[in-house]
Image (tube, helix red, strand yellow):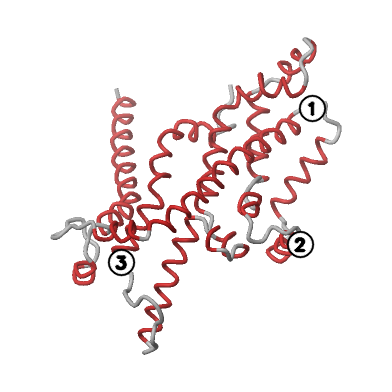
Amino acid sequence: MKKTLEYKIFNVVACVFTTLFALFCLLPMVLTLVASFATDVELAEKGITLILENPTLAAYRSILNDGGKLARAYAVTIGVTVIGTVLGVYLTTMTSYVLYRRDFPARGFFAFFFYFTTLFSGGLVGNYFVRTRLGLRDTYAVLILSGLVSNFYIIMCRSYMTSNVPQSLVEAAKIDGAGDFRIFWQIVFPSCTSIVATIALMTALRYWNDWYTAYIYVSDSDKYPLMYYLYKIFNDQQLRDKLIQLGATVMGDTEPLGNAYQNAMTVVTIGPVVLLYPFFQRYFVSGVTVGAVKE
């Protein structure tokens, strides 16, 4: 009876704490969403609040008025994310499968190679030199190749295969005459649904949120991804405000972009990711706990 009472108390405390922590994490997103419907005057006078006196869609109408650039940035990001995620998952799982096979002669050497490069890298200068010499500057390829494969994901996927796919299953398939690609696609890959979904989600998020690659390698505005387009808007607005404070004359459009516009742009850019995540949540939880419980 004592254990039952302690168990109930623990469950209540855990549920309350988890709920409060979840609400605390959700609060910035809710405030951003509410602020996107506010007027700049109300935000300047009262700040960001949960209750608005005069909600308006003016910020979203302003975004739609300049929807051409936003739509192109969306198209670039969606294309890069889809292509990069598919290729990244394929290369990651295939590499992990090779390292998982015990009959691969250089398995230990390559495993050490992938682990070593997680600790040391060529740095920004080396990466910039290689990519520019390959002619990748101002191309869509640089946006895709920069985040294509992660050594950490390879190690994680290999650990999942080692824990969940018996080597005897692969050996039995080889005895039956199956080739390596058939073993991978029909036996190993279907057994790794959780880790594949986890890697796909994290890779897609990395592509979707990547603005730094475009900042370094892309100067053509037609190839700006969504997050870099958002960064440019915020950065240009801060520069405009600083110049106005210093008394300088700002060339071009003198109408400043208000805080409501910036919050609305944030909502527009993160919306698809927020809607996509619940569909991958159960696979994500299963994948990140790989090796935690082993029967």
Q: Residues within 10 Å of mark 1 (few under 14, many from 20)?
A: few
Identify the amino acid type marked 3.
Asn
Q: Which mark is residue 221?
A: none
N-term mark: 3 or 2: 2
- Give the residue number, with chain letter if any, for mark 2: 133
Eyeballing the image, is 23 above or below 55? Answer: above
Residue at (63%, 38%) from the top-left corner?
156
Residue at (31%, 63%) from the top-left corner?
261
Q: For the view shown, which residue lies furthest in the bottom direction? A: 247
- Give the residue number, with chain letter if any, for mark 1: 102
- Give the residue number, with chain letter if any, for mark 3: 259
Disc 3 or disc 2, which is closer to the eye?
2
Residue 35 in the figure: left or right of residue 215: left
Q: Residues within 10 Å of mark 2 (few under 14, many from 20)?
A: few
Q: Nearer the viewer, residue 141 or 88?
A: 141
N-term mark: 1 or 3: 1
